[in-house]
Structures are given as structure tokens and as C-alpha cells.
Image (spheres, rainbow, N blue to C red):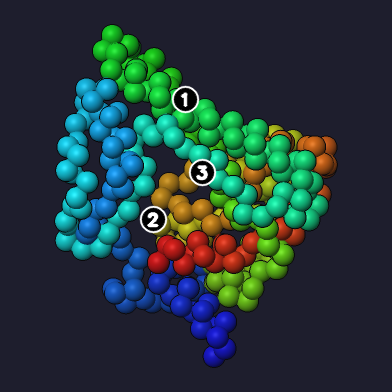
Amino acid sequence: MSQRARRAHAAAAPLHFISGESAMKPTDKQRNVIDIGTLSISRRSMIRGTVAGITAGVLAIPASAEAQFRTPSGSLQIDAGAFDDTHKLKPLPYKAAALKGLSARLIESHWSNNYGGSVRALNATNKRLVAALADHDLPAFTYNDLKREHLMRTGSVVLHELYFDNMGGDGTAPADARCLIASSFGDFDRWESEYRRIAAGLGGGSGWVVFGYNRHFRALENYWMADHMHSPATTVPLLVMDMYEHSYQMDYGAATARYIDAFFANINWDRVMARIEAIR
Ligand SMILES: [Fe+2]
């Protein structure tokens, strides 16, 4: 077995597919189980949570609580506190001009205006939520106007970061990725055909295409998403494609198919495989 084939086997086995063609039968030890053991919260998020809690009058975490919480096994990392209003733009992992078929002007505008706008809006929303929570006269339905914005901006920020991060490659899926995808879709081309068809169907409108691992079904699937807020439950995104018109209109106008080709030519499959590895 070649090194690449061994990697494919190692990457695939612990995911325990119960649908598709896979006949893999992992042991209990291999099952994808999340154990929570040492709960580690960074000083930054703990301090922020304390400040937010005191302001809102609902949460008071003593500074000494920065110490780790012991639970039976495993670990859970928490990097940001609730109501975090200090989210920063994540830099592109490549030069804006480095992508094939997508201009630097388009990528820079998308990154700074659309993605950046959501980062700024998320911070502003979280700041307002803290004040709104402390206002006991504020109707619950009005509070939820902010929670709706919170949900939408969170989805936009996360999906944009995943999208930019899974480009910058040469678009060539390695054998281990093709093997893994074929185990669920029958063959790799069938997966690509569906992903492209979902994207084409979103042309001229808005939404996302997400290839992901559904933890509940333990299955790899392509998902259609109409907006930032409605993602498939329990699914870990592995390959994300922005189908909002701002992703391609500047370069291609309404020619959606050309954008889809450009996206596929820039997929960073190493990043996709790293996300799969991180599930294990
Ligand atoms: Fe976008």
C-alpha cells in the first residue's frame, strides 16, 4: 500500500460511514466520539465573559475561574467568550492576485467589504446585545431582532473564512480525497457533478454550496444553503463555495458557469483534507 493510500485509509476509517458504498466497520475505539475532559478557556475570553456578565447582570465568573475545569476525559478548547465584540478579519492565506480566473480587485473587494462588513457588524451586534440584555424593559421580541442579526453575521463570518481558506490551491484533488469522496458518492465525478449543479442552481441569486460531514448520519453530503443562517444540522463544512453574486459579478457578470469553473480551479484540497483530519 502506497503512502498516499495509507493516508486515505487512515483518514477515512475513523469517520465510520454508514451510507454510501463504504463497508468500513470501525471498532468502538475508532468511532468519532467527542470526549470532554479538561475545559480550557483563554484568559482573553474569560475576562471578556466576566465583563459582559457584570454589565448584563446575569453572569459573574471570578477571575480565578480561569483555571481548567476537570471532567472525565478529553478536552474542549474555547477561544472566544459569548458576546465577543473583538473579532478581527482573518487575512487571506494567499495574495489576492494569486487566484486563477478571479481578479485581485474582486477578491479584495469581497474580503474587505462583504466579509469585513460582516465581521464589523457581528462585533457591533454583540456590543448591543450586552446592553440590550441589561435592559429589563426591552421586549423579548425586540431582543430577538438582535439575535437574528447575531445568527446571520456569525454564519457570514464563519462561511466566508472557510471559503477564502479553501481556495489558493491548484484544484487537483489528490487520490486520497477522490477515494474518500468516491466511498460515499460512488465516484468522484458524481460528487463534482452534484456540487456544480447546486452552484449553478444558485446562480443569479444568493447562497452557499457546502460539502460537509454530517455527524448525525456519519455521512459525506453536498448541501444547498439559501443564506448564512440555515446550515445542515451537526454538519462540519469541508468545502465551502460562496454563491452570492458579489463573489463573481465583478469579473463575470451573470456568467455563473465561468465562476464555478474558476472556483474549482482554485480549490485547495490540502485544506479540505486537513478539515477531514480534524474531525477525527
Ligand atoms: Fe461573500
The residue drawn where x is 28% and y is 17% is 134
Image side of residue 24 versus residue 96, left or right: left
CA gap, disc 1 to disc 3? 16 Å
In front: mark 3 or mark 2?
Answer: 3
Does label 2 or label 1 sit earlier along the sequence? 1
Q: Residues within 10 Å of mark 3 (few under 14, many from 20)?
A: some
Residue type, mark 2 in image: His
Q: Is residue 234 visible?
A: yes
Measured as percent of width and height from the top left, residue 111 is found at 65, 40
Does label 3 or label 2 sit earlier along the sequence? 3
Say what secondary structure mark 3 lies in. helix
Front in this rendered view, residue 198 or 131 = 131
The residue drawn where x is 32% and y is 53% is 77
Image side of residue 190 versus residue 223, left or right: right
Q: Is mark 1 within 8 Å of ligand 1?
A: no
CA gap, disc 3 to disc 2? 21 Å
Front in this rendered view, residue 13 or 191 = 13
Give the residue at mark 3: 158
186 shown above or below 138:
below
Give the residue at mark 2: 216
Evaluate if marks 2 and 1 touch, with contact meaning CB atoms under 8 Å apart.
Answer: no
Does label 1 or label 3 sit earlier along the sequence? 1
Q: Is mark 3 within 8 Å of ligand 1?
A: no
Q: In the drawing, what numbered circle is on residue 189?
A: none
Q: In the drawing, what numbered circle is on residue 124?
A: 1
